[in-house]
Amino acid sequence: MPLYGLLFISPLDPLGYRSSVAAHPYVAELLMLGMMSLPMVGFMAYRRHGIGSTIEMVAAMAIPSLAVIGLTSTSLIPWLTLNTMSVASHVAMLGGMLLAVVYRRAEYAGVHAHGHSVVEPA
Ligand SMILES: [Cu+2]
């Protein structure tokens, strides 16, 4: 998110990118999803999680977020508007991540036994 935010304050294009994403909120939300997924891939690699777990975590972020974006575009839910889409998308994303962690709690909780070097007590 911080890197994504930097896109909005480029001295080379102080208004161009900001105004173009403001005009295309769905594209902006999809870009946000990408810009939050990439660091997650890096973090999962840093934590030595496998490619399967990484794909699962990114899916857990993306699927709820994409569902919110899709639902927003249908106008089926009165409170889900372009004004609330981003917050709802992030809440859904957090919920998806939480579900993934709870579902794989043995992998995410406690001692990592899948590649991390664990410091043994002296
Ligand atoms: Cu975000």
Image (cartoon, rainbow, N blue to C red):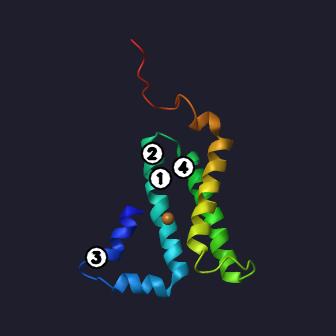
Report, in whole angstroms, how far the alpha carbon at label 4 lies from the one at label 3: 31 Å
Q: Report if the CB atoms under discs 1 and 2 are less than 8 Å apart.
A: yes
Q: Residue furthest right?
A: 76
Please name the amino acid that badge 2 sits on: Ala
**Residue designated by label 3:** 10
Disc 4 is placed on an element classified as helix
Q: Residues within 10 Å of mark 2 (few under 14, many from 20)?
A: some
Nearer-N-terminus badge (4/3): 3
Tell which of 110 and 113 is nearer to you: 110
Please name the amino acid that badge 4 sits on: Thr
| Residue 13 picture location, percent across and down | 28, 83
Q: Residues within 10 Å of mark 1 (few under 14, many from 20)?
A: some
Tell which of 52 and 13 is nearer to you: 13
Q: Report if the CB atoms under discs 4 and 2 are less than 8 Å apart.
A: yes
| Residue 27 picture location, percent across and down | 51, 79
Quadrant including the C terminus: top left
